[in-house]
Image (cartoon, rainbow, N blue to C red):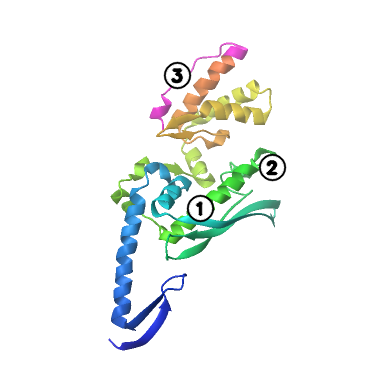
Amino acid sequence: MSEIEKIETPSNTNGEIITIDSAEDLISIAQRRVEIVGKLMTTALKITTHRDWVNQNGNPYLVHSGAEKVARLFGISLSNIKMERMWAEDTKGKYYIYKHTGTAALPGRFDSIEALGTCSQRDAFFGRVSGELRDTSEIDETNIMKASYSNFVVNAITHLLGLRNITWDQLNEAGIDEKSVQEIKYEKDSKKAEARLSKEALETRKKLWDMCLELAAGAEKAAAAILEKYSSFKKNGNTFKVTDIKQFKTEGWIKTTYGRVKEEYEKAFGKIEEDEGQMNIEDQQ
């Protein structure tokens, strides 16, 4: 291997100089860094729990709570944080975007990076329901702003420490089982779930929505609020609920919610024909 002339190169953004005399030195430095990065990643993953991750379309994604734990562990600082509200336009009209920028740095003389986080009114979670855009009045803009900041924090920590593209095998080695991680699915997955519902489940779902509408005197927003209330349940510390009748993923969830709403309906309008036995919601999901 040929000799390399002495090269003075900054080891990090703080300007510390490392002198490399040969290719062997360069390889040796790289190997040490690979070992350090590997240990750093393992340590970071082990401080998180299954509640600090979500299964997003089949891939593990670190959420804000997990990023904060890792930041505290390594003494990472976030500074120069700035928020900006911007406007964009598409075929549906104008919409707002929140953007957060700032600097993430490890303590001492290590690298720092500039990070970015955004969230818009068109966000799939906050801004849409059943594939349709929500009315502006139905969107809590504060949630968009908070999501932008959370995305900034997560991006800053994961980029700084190299915690990108984590695999389920890596999480399993850190003691986190994929089955215990909350799964997030978007509209296309909801449509697939709906296609798997039986004819009877679809009929029950229609009856459920009709009862919600009657209880709400025909007001769809009020009916959606009733649906949200009675579809809600907790599992593994997480709360699940729907705000649109097409968001139900399982027949059991539909039946259980139907039973809950039916009780309220009968209090208001009298007894209706009994349906077959209900299933326990904790056994549905």
- Residue, x 47% and y 44% (percent of image)? 184
Q: Which residues are magenta?
A: 267-285
**Which callout, 1 or 3, points to the residue nearer the camera?**
1
CA distance for labels 1 and 3: 49 Å
| Amino acid of disc 3 | Glu
Q: Quadrant of the C terminus?
A: top left
- Relative height, residue 39 to residue 33 (above, below): above
Query: Of helix, strand and loop, which one carries label 3?
Result: loop
How crowded is the residue under tag 2: few (<14 C-alpha within 10 Å), some, or many (20+)? few
Pointer 3: what residue? Answer: 276
How crowded is the residue under tag 3: few (<14 C-alpha within 10 Å), some, or many (20+)? few
Pointer 1: what residue? Answer: 153
Whole-percent x, y for residue 172 in the image: 31, 49
The tag earlier along the polypeptide, 1 or 3, is 1
| Amino acid of disc 1 | Val
The tag earlier along the polypeptide, 2 or 3, is 2
- Relative to residue 214, is residue 172 drawn left or right? left
Q: Main secondary structure of the magenta part?
A: loop
